[in-house]
Image (tube, grey):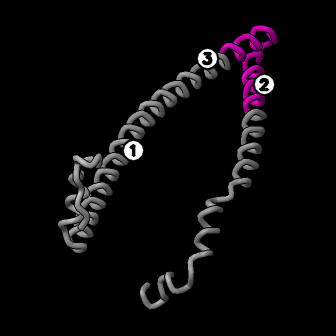
Amino acid sequence: MSERYPEAGNPPPTEAEVKAETSSLGDLLSDVSRDMSVLMRQELELAKAEAKESATRAGKGAGMLTGAGIAGHFVLLFLSIALWWGLGLALDEGSGYVWSAIIVAVIWAIIAAILAAAGKKQLKSVQGIPRTQESVKKIPETLKPSEDAR
C-alpha cells in the first residue's frame, strides 16, 4: 500500500483509490458485476422507451398515410366518374354512357396491369436477410443446437 502525502504535492487519494486499496479482489469483482447488471438493465429500459416512442410515432404516421390513401382513392373514384360522364356526353349516342364506362374501365385495367407487373418484378428482387444468413453460416458447429434438442 502506497502512502500519499498531500504536503509533498500529491493530491489526496480519491474514494475509488481508497476502496481499491482496502477491498478484496472478490469484493471489487462483485461490485463490477453488480454495476454491469445495473447498467445493462438501464440500457434495456432506455431501449424499450425509445422503441415505444418510435412505435407510437410510426403508428401515427401510418394512420395518417392510410387516411391519405383513402382520400386519394376517393379522388380517383370521382375523377373516373367525371371522365365517364364527360366521355358519355362527348359520344352523345344512345349508348354513349355505356361505351364511356367501358373506356374508363379499360384505362384502369391497363393501369392495374402495369402496376401488377412492376410489383411482381419488385417482389422477385427481394433477397430476404442475406447478411444474417451469412453470419449464421459462420457459427461453429459446436454452438448450433443438435438434432436431439429439437
Which span is picked out in magenta? 82-108
Q: Residue at x 22, y 65 (%)?
A: 21
Judged from the image, the secondary structure of the residue bearing numbered disc 3 is: helix
Q: Give whichever of discs 1 and 2 has the lower sequence position.
A: 1
Q: Which residue matches tag 2?
A: 103
Figure quadrant of residue 80: top right
Q: Are marks 1 and 2 in contact (CB under 8 Å)?
A: no
Q: Nearer the viewer, residue 74 or 128?
A: 128
Question: Separation of disc 1 and disc 2 at Cα?
Answer: 49 Å
- Percent x, y for residue 73? 58, 25
Judged from the image, the secondary structure of the residue bearing numbered disc 1 is: helix
Q: Which residue matches tag 3?
A: 78
Question: Separation of disc 3 and disc 1 at Cα?
Answer: 40 Å
Asked if residue 124 lies left or right of residue 50, the reply is right
The amino acid beneath tag 3 is Phe
Q: Give whichever of discs 3 and 1 has the lower sequence position.
A: 1
Q: Residue at x 49, y 88 (%)?
A: 147
Q: Residue furthest bottom?
A: 148
Q: Are marks 3 and 1 in contact (CB under 8 Å)?
A: no
Q: Residue at x 25, y 73 (%)?
A: 25
Q: Give whichever of discs 3 and 2 has the lower sequence position.
A: 3
Tell which tag, 3 or 2, sits nearer the viewer: 3
Magenta stretch, main secondary structure class = helix
Q: Which residue matches tag 1?
A: 51
Figure quadrant of residue 78: top right
Q: Residues within 10 Å of mark 1 (few under 14, many from 20)?
A: few
